[in-house]
Every structure is written in C-alpha cells, then in structure tokens.
Amino acid sequence: MKITYLGHSAFLLTAACGTRILTDPYAGVGYPMPRVAADYAVCSHGHGDHANVRGAAGLKGTVAQAGRYTLGGFTVTGIPSWHDEVRGAKRGANTVFLYEADGVRVCHMGDIGQEPTEELLAAIGSPDVLLIPVGGVYTVDAAGAEEYVRAIRPKTVIPMHYALPGCTLGIAPLSAFSERMGAENCLYKKELELPCAEAEGKTVILEAVR
C-alpha cells in the first residue's frame, strides 16, 4: 500500500491492485486541496474540511458512516466515535476508519476529539499505521495525540490536521507534536510505501502534495 499526503486530513491510499481511496477531502482551510483522482472517498464526518468529495475526480462511491465495506482491494471498517470531549455536544460525531489491504492495516482517526476509551481502543486494535490529528482546537492536541499513540502502539505514526502554510483554522503547527515525539524519532518522506522497515518505530512526516 502507498500513502500520499494531500494536506489537512486528506490522504490518497493506493493498494497494490490499483484501488485508490481518498480520505477526508477538504475545502475552506485557507489553501486548496490538490486535484486528485480516486476510486472512492471516505469521510470521517460531514464538515466541509473533511467531506469535499467534489474535489476528487473519477469517484465510484463515497463512504461516510460506520460499518464494514469492501472497496476494490480494500476492506474498510468504520468505528463510531466523537468529535469532542463531551460526546458530540459541541461538534457531533466522528468515524474512525480502518483500512486493510496488502497485509497492512492503517487507522485514520478523522477529527477525533474524545479521550481514549477501552471500547474505542479495543475496536481499533493494533494497526500498522496510525494517522492522527495533532493540531488541537477541533481535535485532540499534541498531548492528546501522544496519549492515543501510547495507548494504540502502532508501528508507525503519521500526524495530520495541523497548520500547513496558508492554513486559516487557527490550529497548531506540526512542531507541537514532533517535539513531543522527539526529533530522533521523526522520519521525513515524500510518500510512504508499506510495508516499510525504515518507518517502524517512527513518526513519519509526509510532505504534503500542494
């Protein structure tokens, strides 16, 4: 599986068979999402910065709720969760998605805002890669993201939903999280091909396609 970062919480996941899934396509963050073609879009919730499916070309379908799905070469599982620390009272629901293809499991946490619970952690299990928001304000912040990393213990962590150049959302920059993880534990890559022994035990900072 190949993981390409498109900015904010958007990634293009490409299976060996060629199936492409776009996660959380965005608009309204201060910079445009790059034009991308994908077979399916999967949205963690309905806010405009996570559900701009019109920003993708060639879509065969969209998934936007919990459940289990077969999307080409991917098995996708959506897990209910909350966008905030008060069971959705502020910002509503969020769906955590697990993507399985080519013997690899990737967990995209969406706009997770709640604290880890035994139920949620059990549903997530042990993914190889954790895509976790780190910018705070609308999601967990760097400390909250670190708490999830320590609880889930994935092989590889990829941060998302932080302030890239041009961002107008008021969220924190990547440094707030990368400093907590330690510079010696950070690996910078253009994209990530899995499995990747080099990335195991690392926080991988992917270059955003702009």
Image (cartoon, helix red, strand yellow):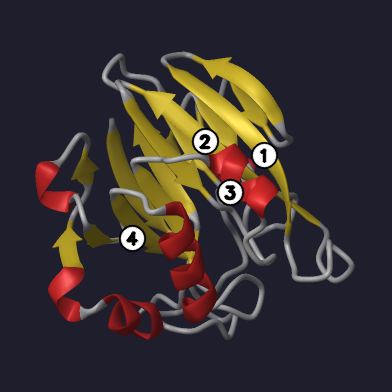
Residue type beneath disc 4: Arg
Q: How far apart are the two marked residues, 3 and 4, measured between alpha carbons?
A: 33 Å
Q: Secondary structure at mark 1?
A: strand
Residue 18 % position (x, y)? 32, 18
Residue at 44%, 71% (x, y): give it: 146
Q: How far apart are the two marked residues, 1 and 4, measured between alpha carbons?
A: 30 Å
Answer few, some or many: residues within 10 Å of disc 1's Cα (few below 14, many 20 plus, some between 14 and 19).
some
Q: Earlier in the sequence, mark 3 or mark 1?
A: 1
Residue 131 to residue 72: above or below? below
Residue at 31%, 22% (x, y): give it: 103
Q: Are marks 3 and 4 in contact (CB under 8 Å)?
A: no
Q: Earlier in the sequence, mark 1 or mark 4?
A: 1
Residue 130 % position (x, y)? 41, 51
What residue did someone put label 2 on?
98
Residue at the far front: name it. Answer: 118
Q: How far apart are the two marked residues, 3 and 1, measured between alpha carbons?
A: 10 Å
Residue 79 numbered mark, or none? 1
Locate the C terminus by quadrant.
bottom left
Q: Earlier in the sequence, mark 2 or mark 4?
A: 2
Give left or right: position of 117 versus 19.
Answer: right
Residue type beneath disc 3: Leu
Residue 25 % position (x, y)? 55, 49
What residue did someone put label 3 on?
121
Q: Earlier in the sequence, mark 2 or mark 1?
A: 1
Residue 210 numbered mark, or none? 4
Give left or right: position of 28 versus 107.
Answer: right
Q: Earlier in the sequence, mark 3 or mark 4?
A: 3
